[in-house]
């Protein structure tokens, strides 16, 4: 009997009755149903998150933020509702708790009453962290809780960017204001420097004037002392003049009395002289001549008296003036003494003023140097603060809020979540399909073992039937992935080829288990499937596995099927595919050799299991 005949004989057996045909069709559909339905259900779950019900509790009462009344809780809630990333439903805290308990909501997010106040506390002396409260119930769905955690982190990032952007803009505006004020201050310091330079020049002039004033007041002091001495002398002289005029008055009085006496006695004397001349025998003419000679004497005496009296009047006036001069000189002397004392004080003050003006000049010089340093420092400080317009400051604040952007650069990229899981579940579906087929396919024909003594042909025939049926399964699964689910393939023929090779390899492994261990080997095929389910690295990276399981990842074939599928499906590294194919080929050949050895043993020996088959197998 040849190999094709043995394959046809097995296929006729599998389709000999209606129930056998139904069983074959049902088992052939197992990998298609498993892989297709699972990947269909998980094709794009993240694209349906807007159907996930979530409660949104806004208890925020608002607060002053940057001088403006704000309510960040309401702002965030509005942004979440507008974004529509989840089916957000506004609720009270009591409604949210009841909804979580009843399964109405998968999770709830609460923005507490002090939410805005906590954010605003950043600029106070008692800053505190604002809280976003996440309410979950794993009794509803564990992954929904995980998704809720990711949503809270996203909200936290959004709020942080908003707050940092506003705070950054306020800071940049304040820095710009400081720069302007520093520029104005530098201008004022420059003006101060100029004013101090002028003040220094004035102080120099003041020092010179104070020196001259000190010299002048010293001279004035000396002159006032001399004036006081001279006034005293004038006062003494005036007093002597007053005494002299008093004596002159007495003489004038005596002269006046004498003149008055002459005037009163002159007529009598004239009559006596005339009488004596007449007695002497002079005639009247001679007497008149003599009397005429005597008359000028009286006149001259009257004139002298008049002159004396006039002189006395002048002397009286001189006396009065002398007394006034004496009194004035006394006053001048007293004033000169006072002036001398005052000018001495003034001279001392002028000397102090001169010294102070000199010190002022030195201080103004140092102050001018300091003002110059202040001007230069303010100018340097203003120059170090950049000048940007409002639009640029807004852009800087936005960049400060999100200084790092994530730019994804993927060498390969899956179409969606379902496409990302497709290599793993397709590889797993291939094993399940082969395992199911061996429930009805006889690994080795007992008649062929008895009739033929060709272990190689028997092994090949025993493998070819499930491998052929498994290939039909993989072809159907590939059609579901490509047509029904719409997954794209970078290399579709290579993908199909890997699925066919994987199914053939699985068939060889399960065949070897069945040849050597019978029903126990069939059970071990299930155990091996479970081990590969957790070690293939189809969901989480295999590096996250415990060390013993991670070691199995490098040995068992399903991990290599997953890796090869990813490379050809997403357009990855072809060099890695060759290694995967080599490992699968090694498993295919190795398991085939082991199966052939088992068949060889069966052709030469009979075991107790052959004489008394297992109830299961």
Image: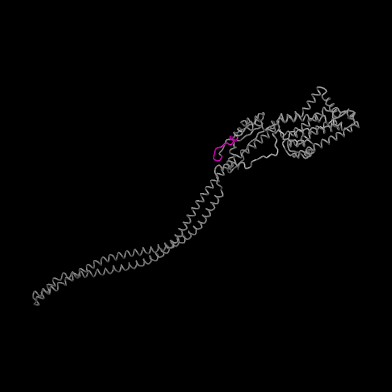
Question: Is any part of residue 527 visible from this angle?
Answer: no
Residue 85 lies in the magenta-colored region: no
Is residue 178 left or right of 408 when viewed as pictured?
Answer: left
x then y, percent, for residue 462: 84, 30
Q: Quadrant of residue 326?
A: bottom left
Q: Quadrant of residue 510?
A: top right
Q: Quadrant of the C terminus?
A: top right
Q: Quadrant of residue 225?
A: bottom left
Residue nearer the viewer, 407 or 312: 407
x then y, percent, for residue 551: 79, 39
Residue nearer the viewer, 585 or 340: 585
Q: How many marks?
A: 0
Residue 71 lies in the magenta-colored region: yes
x then y, percent, for residue 505: 81, 34
Magenta stretch, residue numbers: 65-76
Q: Quadrant of the N terminus?
A: top right
Instruction: Tell me which colouring the rendered structure shows.
Output: one colour
Is residue 87 left or right of 380 when viewed as pictured?
Answer: right
Whether residue 602 is situated above or below residue 381 in the rendered picture? above
x then y, percent, for residue 214: 43, 63
Question: Is any part of residue 568 visible from this angle?
Answer: yes
Task: Look at 33% across and 67% down and name the residue there.
Answer: 234
The residue most toward the bottom is: 280
């Amino acid at each position: 009997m040849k190999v094709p005949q043995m394959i046809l004989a097995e296929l006729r057996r599998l389709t000999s009755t209606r129930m056998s045909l139904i069983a074959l069709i049902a088992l052939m559909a197992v990998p298609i149903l498993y892989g297709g339905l699972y990947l269909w259900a998980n094709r794009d779950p993240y694209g349906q998150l807007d159907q996930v019900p979530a409660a949104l509790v806004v208890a925020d009462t608002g607060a002053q933020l940057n001088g403006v009344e704000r309510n960040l809780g309401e702002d965030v809630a509005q942004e979440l509702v507008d974004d529509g990333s989840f089916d957000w439903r506004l609720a009270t805290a009591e409604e949210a708790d009841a909804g979580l308990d009843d399964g109405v909501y998968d999770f709830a997010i609460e923005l507490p009453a002090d939410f805005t106040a906590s954010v605003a506390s950043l600029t106070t002396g008692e800053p505190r962290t604002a809280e976003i409260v996440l309410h979950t119930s794993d009794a509803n769905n564990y992954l929904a809780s995980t998704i809720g955690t990711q949503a809270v982190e996203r909200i936290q990032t959004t709020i942080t960017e908003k707050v940092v952007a506003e705070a950054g803009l306020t800071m940049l505006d304040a820095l710009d204001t400081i720069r302007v004020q520093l520029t104005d201050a530098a201008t004022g310091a420059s003006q101060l420097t100029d004013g101090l330079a002028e003040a220094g020049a004035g102080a120099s002039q003041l020092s010179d004037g104070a020196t001259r004033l000190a010299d002048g007041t010293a001279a004035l002091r000396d002159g006032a002392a001399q004036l006081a001495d001279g006034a005293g002398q004038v006062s003494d002289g005036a007093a002597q003049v007053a005494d002299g005029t008093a004596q002159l008055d007495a003489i004038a009085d005596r002269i006046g009395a004498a003149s008055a006496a002459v005037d009163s006695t002159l007529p009598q004397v004239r009559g006596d002289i005339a009488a004596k001349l007449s007695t002497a025998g002079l005639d009247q003419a001679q007497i008149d001549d003599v009397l005429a000679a005597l008359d000028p004497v009286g006149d001259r005496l009257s004139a002298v008296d008049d002159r004396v009296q006039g002189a006395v009047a002048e002397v009286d006036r001189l006396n009065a003036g002398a007394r006034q001069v004496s009194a004035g000189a006394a006053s001048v002397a007293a004033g000169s003494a006072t002036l001398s004392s005052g000018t001495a004080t003034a001279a001392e003050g002028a000397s102090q003023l001169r010294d102070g003006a000199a010190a002022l000049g030195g201080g103004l010089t140092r102050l001018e140097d300091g003002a110059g340093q202040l001007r230069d420092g303010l100018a340097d400080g203003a120059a170090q603060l950049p000048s940007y317009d409002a639009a640029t400051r807004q852009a800087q604040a936005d960049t400060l809020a999100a200084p790092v952007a994530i730019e994804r650069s993927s060498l390969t990229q899956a179409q969606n979540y379902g496409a990302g899981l497709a290599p793993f579940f397709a590889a797993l579906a291939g094993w399940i399909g082969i395992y199911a087929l061996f429930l009805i396919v006889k690994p080795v024909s007992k008649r062929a073992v008895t009739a033929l003594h060709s272990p190689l042909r028997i092994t090949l025939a025993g493998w070819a039937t499930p491998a052929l049926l498994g290939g039909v399964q993989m072809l159907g699964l590939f059609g579901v992935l490509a047509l029904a689910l719409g997954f794209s393939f970078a290399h579709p023929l290579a993908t199909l080829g890997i699925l066919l090779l994987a199914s053939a390899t699985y068939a060889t492994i399960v065949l070897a288990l069945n040849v050597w261990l019978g029903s126990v080997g069939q059970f071990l095929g299930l155990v091996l499937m479970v081990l590969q389910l957790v070690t293939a690295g189809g969901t989480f990276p295999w590096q996250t596995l415990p060390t013993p399981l991670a070691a199995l990842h490098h040995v068992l074939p399903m991990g290599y099927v997953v890796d090869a599928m990813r490379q050809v499906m997403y357009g990855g590294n072809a060099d890695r595919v060759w290694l995967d194919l080599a490992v699968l080929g090694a498993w295919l050949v190795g398991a085939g050799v082991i199966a052939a050895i088992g068949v060889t043993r069966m052709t030469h020996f009979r075991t107790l299991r052959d004489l008394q088959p297992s109830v299961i197998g």
